[in-house]
Structure formats: structure tokens, C-alpha cells
Image (spheres, rainbow, N blue to C red):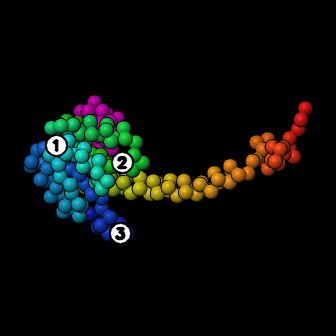
Amino acid sequence: MTTPVSSALGPAALPPVLIAEDEAASRLLLEATLRGWGHEVVVTVDGDAAWAALQRSDAPSVAILDWMMPGPEGVEICRRVHAQGSPTPPYLILLTANSERAKVIAGLEAGAGDFIGKPFDPDELRARRIVATRVVDLRAKLAERVRELEAAMGPVKQLHGLLPICAYCKKIRDDRNHCSGWRST
């Protein structure tokens, strides 16, 4: 029996998941499994719809993308997301029936965070979903820390511009740009 990831925030803390799968049986099974674990699920049937969903301001933070589907394939969507350089990109899992080494390498290099084979095993999906949730949480915390550091650096940068510090002796320069540590030759 599988259970959702537990957290201090409860089931509502589970990230929303995008499914991009053109095969109806696989798509319905993925959707039912993820909803059963408490995820909000956005379902698309081709790469164009998946890409559009990932561009929205409320885009899901985890996406399970079929490698081969109409429109941009899953690996192309990975490349596009990676090229955007977002500080909090969605965690991308490629769903494929082809798990040969070259495909896995190509997918990871394109920006996928993980792979899952078709047909998927629910226990394996659960484990990969747990990893995805951890990564999404860590990225969000890191982005928040960066915002905090940038906010804290604002006053420091302002003071740095106001106080002319001598690079040689580290003392404050006077109005004529001289400091007590300056030695003339």
C-alpha cells in the first residue's frame, strides 16, 4: 500500500503534477494514481498543450512528460524549460518505453530530472514522486534564501557607494580621496 508524502503542511503541500501523455490508457492510469495520492493533476495529450501549461504563472511544479507524443516531444520540452534558466524550474520526469543508455543520457542532458519506464510501476512512480517533491521543496527554499540575501545586500551596496574605502589600507578616504594609509613615493 502506498501513501502520500507526509509533511508538516499536510497533503496540501504535495506539488501539482502535469501529465503529458497521448496514450489514453497510460494517461488515465497516471492521473488516477497521482490523484489517489492527493496531487492536483493537469492533464494534456500533446507537447504543445504541455508547453503552454508550463508557461502559465500557476504552472505545475512537477511534470511527467511522454518522450514521444504529438507536437514537441518530452525531451524537447525539457530542453526548452532548461533554456529558460528559471531559478525554480519544474521537476521534469520523462516517461518512455525506451530506456536504452543513450536515451537516458540525452534526456538528462536536456534537463530531465528523472525517468520512468512504460508501463510504469506504481511503487517506482511513488518513489520518484517523493524525490521530485523533495527537489521542488529544496528549489523553493533556495530561491527564498536568494531573495532574502539580495534584499539584505541592498543596504550594504548603498553604504558601499556612500563610504569611499581605500583598497590599500581599508580606511575611509577624505574629501580629496586621500586616506591615512596612502604612501606617496
Query: Does residue 123 lie above or below 80 as drawn?
Result: below
Q: Along the horizontal axis of the image, is 87 left or right of 16?
A: right
User: Which residue is under mark 3?
Assistant: 9
Instruction: Tell me the residue at 12%/53% (across/down).
Output: 28
Sequence-wise, the earlier of marks 2 and 3 is 3
> Looking at numbered disc 2 in the image, what kind of residue is underneath it?
Pro
Give the magenta-colored segment's residue range.
100-115
The x and y percentages for residue 87 are: 42, 48
Q: Residues within 10 Å of mark 2 (few under 14, many from 20)?
A: some
**Residue 92 visible in the picture:** yes
Query: How far, Cα to Cα, is label 2 from label 3?
Result: 22 Å
Q: Along the horizontal axis of the image, is 64 left or right of 166?
A: left
Q: Secondary structure at mark 1?
A: loop
* Residue positioned most to the right: 185
Q: Secondary structure at mark 3?
A: loop
Instruction: Specify whether residue 93 is painted magenta.
Output: no
